[in-house]
Amino acid sequence: MIRTTLASPAQTPALLARYLAVRRRSMDLAAPLSEADCQLQSMPDTSPTKWHLAHITWFFETFVLEQVEPDFRPFDPAFRVLFNSYYNAVGDKHPRPRRGQISRPDLARVKAYRAQVDARMRHLLESPPAGAWQAIVELGLQHEQQHQELLLTDIKHALSCNPMLPVYQAGWPLASVAPVPTAWHECAAGLVEIGHSGDDFTFDNELPRHKTWLAPHALANRVVTHGEWAEFIADGGYRDPRWWLASGWDWVCTGGIEAPLYWQRGGDAATPDWHSFTLHGQVPIDAHTPISHISYFEADAFARWISHVSHAHRGSRLPTEAEWEACAARHAAITLPRGNFVESRALHPLPVATVTPEPMQLFGDVWEWTSSAYNAYPGYRPWSGAVGEYNGKFMVNQYVLRGGSCVTPRSHIRASYRNFFPTDARWQFSGVRLARDID
């Protein structure tokens, strides 16, 4: 069963307002793009903007309207296959790597699809029948917020493949800030509880709340920066197998990896002048801003390297997700976490430098890799029905990231939220916070 406080029909006015706001936000994020931009799919892991807009509409049509409307008729029967993502219980799917080949329906028809489904959903929410379908509406809104983030990361990758290096939305330069030195927040050994608590919405993979033992450890007060990563490169970090897991070193060698995704080297070999592609276009790296678009392999290698070369970072490693969540729970005992989210700079999302060691830059800016494999919590039970495919079936060959990023909606994130990606994924705004054991 999906846990949410929005299952009562008496609360549907608030749910309708939230529905309209979230749906409008998706269209706002797509507004700077041309129709040609919305068609782009630059690699199998990404999806076209047009597909995102249609798929999140398909979710409401398939999981809400089809179940509730007395005389349900689909907007277009072909969309059931075209815009199904991975729900095997629903039926056939168009292959993910070929979503960019779906030139029809065009963008105008996708917008018409959204408008029609929104009108039907509005009617439903204004005069709700009895039932618990409101919980599925809230799940759909959380789902749409995930796709809002994907829309931005996917279009960034697509635009980066254009030799003209087009700008999504100009907002550069940002104000410069002084660097914050690394400090360590020590945490004593003890039994802690992690996982979601309370009655507000949560995904099934955040449950059940359970106890786990933490050894004494410390977490860095901020995430790793572009400047620190440039030092890793200058010291031959991508050329030295000592720092890399075996499969990570194979990945570096096979892919010719020399720097984070989107970095471009200028200048000469002795004094490289690094630039990075952003949603603002190609810009010089800012030494004090958080490193982003790195894989688990890179995050782990950097921790090994800096532990070796810096006495102040001796023993550095990636935190476990339990260490991260326990720390976040202590430092973010508020309704909505503070941080740099997609709303923070309107349509100018970019990781920014921290200006104070508190509140540890735990939320926003970049997703933080942990050393924890994405597995089920003890006693985990997936949701029933087709939505049970949402999380559980991906619990293999992935690692957990925490905290949200500069393209995450603020209302979507919480201390218990578990993101997950394969070890070589780096088109997301993924970064790293260091941890270490305390003897």
Image (cartoon, rainbow, N blue to C red):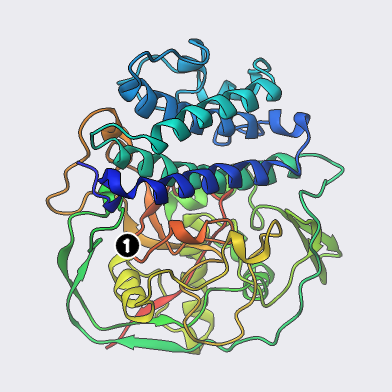
Q: Image quarter for residue 354?
A: bottom right
- Residue in the foreground of this view, choosing between 407 and 122: 122
Instruction: Name the side, left or right, on which 323 lies relative to 239.
Output: left
| Position above or below: 396 against 369 | above
Instruction: Name the side, left or right, on which 262 lies relative to 208.
Output: right
| Position above or below: 75 against 31 | above
Farthest residue, direction top: 77
| Position above or below: 20 against 184 | above
**Amino acid bearing label 1:** Ser
Marks counted in the figure total: 1
Quadrant the N terminus occupies: top left
Callout 1 environment at 10 Å: few (<14), some (14 to 19), or many (20+)?
A: many
Q: Which residue is mark 1?
A: 416
- Residue in the foreground of this view, choosing between 61 and 401: 61
Q: Residue at the location (27% across, 54% down)?
A: 206
Farthest residue, direction left: 379
The answer to whether residue 242 is visible is no
Q: Image quarter for residue 70?
A: top left
- Provide residue 265's location: percent of width, then percent of height: 79, 59
Farthest residue, direction front: 127
Q: Image quarter for residue 181?
A: bottom right
Q: Residue at the location (70% across, 75% down)?
A: 287
- Residue in the foreground of this view, choosing between 356 and 115: 115
The answer to whether residue 124 is visible is yes
Q: Residue at the location (40% across, 31% down)?
A: 124
- Provide residue 167's location: percent of width, then percent of height: 81, 50
Quadrant the C terminus occupies: bottom left
Looking at the rendered structure, the secondary structure element under dot 1 is loop
- Provide residue 222's location: percent of width, then percent of height: 51, 79
Instruction: Name the side, left or right, on which 298 lies relative to 381.
Output: right
